[in-house]
Image: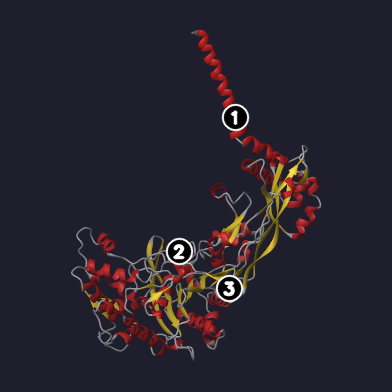
Amino acid sequence: MRRVLLYILIITTGIAFLGRLFYLQVVDTSFALRSQNNAIKVVYDYPQRGYIYDRNGELMVSNQPSYDVMVIPRNLKPFDTTEFCKILSLTPQQLGKKLDKAKIYSPMLPSVVVPQLTKGEYAYLQEKMRKYEGFYIQKRSLRDYQVENAANVLGYISEVNQKTVNDNPYYISGDLMGRQGVEQQYEELLRGVKGVKHIQKDRFNRDIGPYKDGIYDTLPEKGKDITISIDATLQAYGEKLMENKRGGIVAIEPSSGEILSLVTAPSYDPAKLVGRKRSENFTKLWYDTIAQPLYDRGLLAEYPPGSPFKTMNALIGLQEGVVDVDDQFSCNHGYSYGRGRKMGCHSHSSPLDMVPGIANSCNAYFANVYRRIIEKYPTPQEGIDTWNAHLKSFGLGDYLGNDLQNGRPGKIPDSEYYNKIYNYPTYKWYSTATLSNAIGQGEVLLTPIQLANMTAVIANRGWYYTPHLLKEVEGKKIKEKKFTVKNHTTIDPEHFEPVVEGMHQVYTNGTASSLRIPGIEIAGKTGTAENFTRIDGKRTQLTDHSIFIAFAPVDDPKIAIAVFVENGYWGSRYAGRIASLMIEKYIRNNITRTDMEDWILSHSLEEEYAKPLSGEPFIINR
């Protein structure tokens, strides 16, 4: 029995050894890979990123050569650190940290030591590289911006972080990728495909030529060129008009949903985020928490829309059948309701029906319309949810789905929201409790891009394409369903005509009559929104925001625009002038209202923005 057990033990041990040998020699290739890695060096050949053109074929972003100093830690030999640091303008401590970081990443894989050398630095260092074994120079391409604007649209490129390297096998340490804007959204189109070279090494770790005559080598593939919908001339003009101001401008082509301009102010020159000073410049921009140049107000800022929102209540009132275009309401400098409360209004003729109600921006008119909408149903909860559903069909209160990474949904309140505010679950609230919604104040919040899209819907009489920036890839028009299928609202097309006429009369004889552009029929709507902030813990009212929406020409819309100027006093003062100038610039490519242009360019709001710090008084209700 003992002899049998001994045989079994010997046989079992032999089988275990044979199995392990089979696994190591046949199944497990890790040692072969390690051996291969010791004998073969992989070098990447980086492609040029695709160019970015504007809608008219103007080049906005191209490339320029750049050179990175790379290191493979295991190949390092002793070298003169003092001379090396002097050439690269590094301290020995900085170099030591970079080499330690490279070792942690991988002793056998390349890491960036110094990125983005200039041509002069590269030429000088190239002559001395033979002295620094383990280091080499990697050629790449950096962005070369042909415009000094549209930084928020274009985005920038920067080195990948470790998380990206771990999550995406395409990238290795030191690679560059798109951040923000078009660069990030269309990274896979723009980046191209890296080429790979396999270099055979001898036992002394010297390069001896291509591995297997280069049969495994690949050439780089240039990134795809794309055309975006932005009009570079219009974008530059919008940023010029917004100098020394804060806010956003969004212009859309109604017939396609293509974004013509996406201005945020203040902004910055995109070239600041290129080259060795990129990190320093980005830090300055990031920590500017007052002006916030990296904050895209066109997509992210949520504001009360003010009087332009009255057009929505007019359309809902018509669709719900609670008001007719000929119904008139009186206005005695405002609308009185409940226990002496009054919604004020400026001086104008009274009573008014819908078209002059829009043209003169009568608060009392729209207070009556709003109450009829809500009170049509047995409970205010049903009324507010019906109102909410109509607004959602315009793309309000939710993410629009445009093709940029960032954005905010805005806010269109519903019954659930008000139930929580007004003593949930007793539901004791009425239409007067939410009356500020009638004039675009209260709980309603919209982003400038939502406001522009709302304007495009009115221009189209009830439909829109999802706003987007991508127009063509390698000269071929996009066919993505998301951007080529019409979205229809819940409002019947016939109800838009009186609203369009009211907006037209805003220019002909209403609140924007001084902003007319000779020869261009424009429909618009002024807006003034109350503006609050907290100063020393106290809710304080600041100078009102200036808002304006418009589209033109009235009967064949080419452009729909929304302008929002923070602390801009009232609608026609800043935003209205800017909108009119932008429309003329786009349609005619020149300016006849130079009086308005001179006024905008010569006026600054920087003093207004300094008031929370200086303690100077604000302009209220002007």
**Relative to 554, residue 134 above or below:** above
Q: Which mark is residue 22?
A: 1
**Where is residue 82, by image quadrant?**
top right
**Relative to 19, residue 561 above or below:** below
Residue most extreme to the left: 378
Q: Which residue is mark 2?
A: 407
Please provide percent x and percent y for residue 212: 73, 45
Q: CA distance from mark 1 to mark 2?
A: 56 Å
Please provide percent x and percent y for residue 84: 76, 48
The answer, for residue 134, to whether it is visible in the render is no
Q: Amino acid at mark 2?
A: Gly
Q: Secondary structure at mark 2?
A: loop
Q: Which mark is residue 41?
A: none
Please provide percent x and percent y for residue 305: 38, 73
Q: Residues within 10 Å of mark 1 (few under 14, many from 20)?
A: few
- Colouring chosen for the image of the structure: secondary structure
Q: Which residue is mark 3?
A: 54
Q: Residues within 10 Å of mark 2 (few under 14, many from 20)?
A: many
Report the residue at 58% width, 23% height from top: 17
**Relative to 278, residue 77 above or below:** above
Label 1–label 3 contact, CB within 8 A: no
The answer, for residue 116, to whether it is visible in the render is yes
Q: Secondary structure at mark 1?
A: helix
Report the residue at 27% width, 75% height from top: 370
Which is in the foreground here, disc 1 or disc 3? 1
Q: Secondary structure at mark 3?
A: loop
* Of pointers 1 and 3, the one earlier in the residue sequence: 1
Q: Nearer the viewer, residue 75 or 273?
A: 75
Which is in the foreground here, disc 1 or disc 2? 1
* Of pointers 3 and 2, the one earlier in the residue sequence: 3
Q: Amino acid at mark 1?
A: Phe
